[in-house]
Image: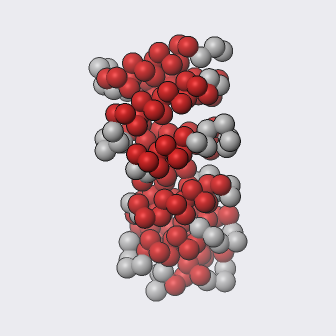
């Protein structure tokens, strides 16, 4: 029943239904939310994007990228939560093309994930160093500051070095 409400005529009901689907995880949840990414209403699209990340719907990453390209910035966080190493490389291709503020949630999620290879995390840091914007510098500084003392290893050192090299 809840899944069918994601297609209700009232956008507010569709948005709440998408949130409920993400929380309750009924059968067909990922497919329903993936379809809702194309909804006419921005709140429904946002709820669907967030919900796909909550569900761990790795099969929806391509649709999330498409949604991100169409201005659904909430897709960024879910991409960061779900992306494989190859998809992380794809995401890095958006740096400089999309607003940094829209991509930074994905980058934060990637750097926080234990299942992401260190090489991919170092690629993120290197790409941010190449970008060399004040936003990239602040992001790297905030990342390092949020790490517990002694944590982060090579990624931490690379982030510290990159932040120092970016001129204000």
Residue sitting at x 52%, y 70%:
34
Instruction: Find residue 89 and report its horizontal and vertical position in percent.
Output: 49, 43
Percent x, y of residue 137: 57, 23
Q: Is residue 97 above or below residue 39?
A: above
Q: How many numbered marks appear?
A: 0
* Pick the front one: 84 or 104: 84
The image position of residue 25, as x and y in percent, is 38, 72
In the picture shown, does residue 25 fall above or below 137?
below
Task: Classify residue 107 as left or right of residue 15.
Answer: left
In the image, what residue occupies the spot 50% across and 27% down?
Answer: 126
Q: Is residue 167 visible?
A: yes
**Image: 106 above or below 161:** below
Query: Which residue is found at the position 60% from the left and 76% from the top?
Result: 13
- In the rendered view of the protein, which quadrant contains the C terminus? top right
Percent coordinates x, y for residue 66 in the rendering: 60, 60
Q: Residue at x 40, y 50 (%)?
A: 84
Choose between 154 and 6: the one closer to the eye: 154
Res 106 seen here: no
Question: Colour scheme of this structure image?
Answer: secondary structure
Q: Does residue 89 sit above or below 17 in this rendering?
A: above
């Amino acid at each position: 029943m809840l899944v069918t409400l994601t297609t209700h005529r009232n956008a507010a009901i569709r948005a709440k239904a998408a949130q409920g689907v993400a929380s309750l995880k009924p059968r067909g949840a990922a497919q329903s939310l993936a379809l809702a990414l194309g909804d006419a209403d921005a709140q429904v699209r946002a709820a669907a994007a967030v919900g796909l990340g909550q569900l761990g719907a790795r099969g929806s990453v391509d649709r999330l990228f498409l949604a991100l390209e169409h201005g659904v910035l909430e897709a960024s966080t879910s991409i960061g939560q779900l992306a494989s190493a190859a998809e992380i490389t794809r995401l890095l291709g958006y740096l400089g093309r999309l607003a940094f503020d829209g991509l930074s949630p994905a980058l934060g999620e990637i750097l926080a994930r234990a299942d992401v290879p260190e090489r991919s995390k170092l690629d993120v840091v290197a790409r941010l160093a190449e970008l060399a914007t004040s936003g990239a510098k602040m992001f790297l500084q905030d990342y390092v500051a949020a790490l517990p003392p002694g944590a982060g290893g090579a990624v931490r050192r690379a982030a510290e070095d990159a932040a120092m090299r970016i001129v204000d």
